[in-house]
Amino acid sequence: MPVQFKHWFQGDRFIWGIVIMMVLMSVLSVYSASGTLAYQWQGGDTSVYIIRHIRHLLIGLACILLFSRLPYKTYWYAAPLVFWGSVVLLVMTLFMGVTENDAVRRLEIFGMTFQTSDIAKITLMMFLARKLANLKEKDTETTKGVPLIFVAISLVFAFILPANFSTAALSLGAAMCLIFIGQVPTKNILLFITGCALAFSVYLMASYQLEKHGVHTSVTGRGITWVNRISNFSLFQDWGSANIHSEAEQDRKLAEDYQAEQARIAVGTGGIFGKGPGQSTQRNFLPHPYSDYIYAIIIEEYGIAGGFLVLLLYVALLFRVGLIVRMSDRSFPAFLAIGLCLIIVFQAIIHMAVGTGLAPVTGQPLPMISMGGSSIISTGVSLGIILGISRETRKRAQESEKATLAGAQESASTSEAADHSSEKVSADDLQDPTPTHPQTK
């Protein structure tokens, strides 16, 4: 690799290869999947959406380059500030956010809209990594670290939940895995999960009853939608249908059933090697083939082989980050890298499970592949931080190896000098022996 490229593209080269493959797959898939959208809203001009998507990808790559050059100590000092700032943004979104698809998920500031949950997921991992590092290194905050960890997770889960159950569950699951890796007592984790389950059950019943009586706000959540999605996916589909109380709810249920069915058709007709790039037919029927169901389109066009390749990219990313964590001699960067990687991989797994009919319908984009500015940028920030950690970890490992090698060489040279001195003394003794007995004539 030329020197100028090495200067910019720092960090683990294997992860850079994964990123480049994701970007290429993203351009091909979004260009194909957005064709119907272009004909519907742009008079057939297919370049509009792909140019916008490429612009988002370039911004995402710029975020990777920027954050890969920052030292991880920056995130250590910034973690508390950015985390509590993201909690404030989540609260603002609940009461001042933009409503899309009957949910308030975005916040508009200075004419720009963004999904605040994407920011909260990253800052939560920073905050947890710092607290877990304190626990690991027996710092002064040890006694109050565990309760504050659970408070932070609870706040993020509670403020994301009303508008986006899948993202709240994703954040909770990744956080639980991270604190388990961080060796928080298992008893505390199980108690916390039990408490979350009980609190969510109460909230779900309350939200369901309020919606049933016509009360729907950004805070009360979407209880009927959640119940219907779970019942449609489970063995109790008739129970879910029986609890639909309005024409709007019936239309929503039919729309979700329609999406799932069209996604299954896309997957089923893909075969082993697919229909070929740009040959998808289900993109004309799926409501969001370029974002929520892009994995189904990938399988339809590139077959099971293409779908497996995409899955392999995320598995390889997790494996590579695991190697970086093993190489790290510091707790904070190790926890931060694995936490951000878990967010990316869990989100990808949820998206692929929905696209193949293995999970209830939900709106999770495929990281770094689906069309969507907030998702691409947040994934770019996460990958940039991971690459920055890999760069510093490798640098520290090389310096430690050099120091060890230098110490071994110095020890060897000292030993060699001592041996040489001993040999010289022995030679002098042979040349000028000292008589032990007086000689007689």
Image (tube, grey):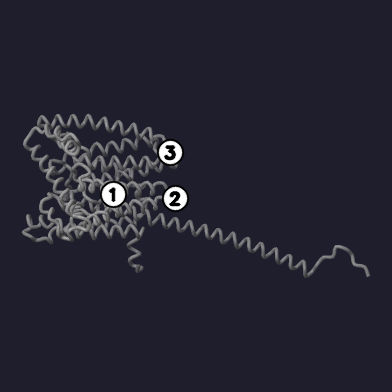
Label 3 with label 1: CB-CB less than 8 Å: no
In the picture, residue 243 is in which quadrant?
top left
Residue type at numbered disc 1: Ile
The Cα–Cα distance between marks 2 and 3, rounded to whole angstroms, is 20 Å
Q: Secondary structure at mark 3?
A: loop
In the picture, residue 305 is in which quadrant?
bottom left
Whether 146 is drawn above or below 326: the answer is above
209 left or right, relative to 80:
left
Whether 83 is drawn above or below 270: the answer is above
Residue 329's label in the rendered image is 2
The Cα–Cα distance between marks 2 and 1, rounded to whole angstroms, is 24 Å
Q: Secondary structure at mark 1?
A: helix
x and y percent of residue 40 in the render? Answer: 7, 55
The residue nearer to you, when weighing 54 against 82, is: 54
Callout 2 crowding tier (Cα within 10 Å): few <14, some 14–19, many ≥20: few
**Residue indicated by mark 3:** 140
263 left or right, relative to 78:
left
Q: Secondary structure at mark 2?
A: loop
**Residue indicated by mark 1:** 344
Residue type at numbered disc 2: Asp
- Quarter containing the C terminus: bottom right
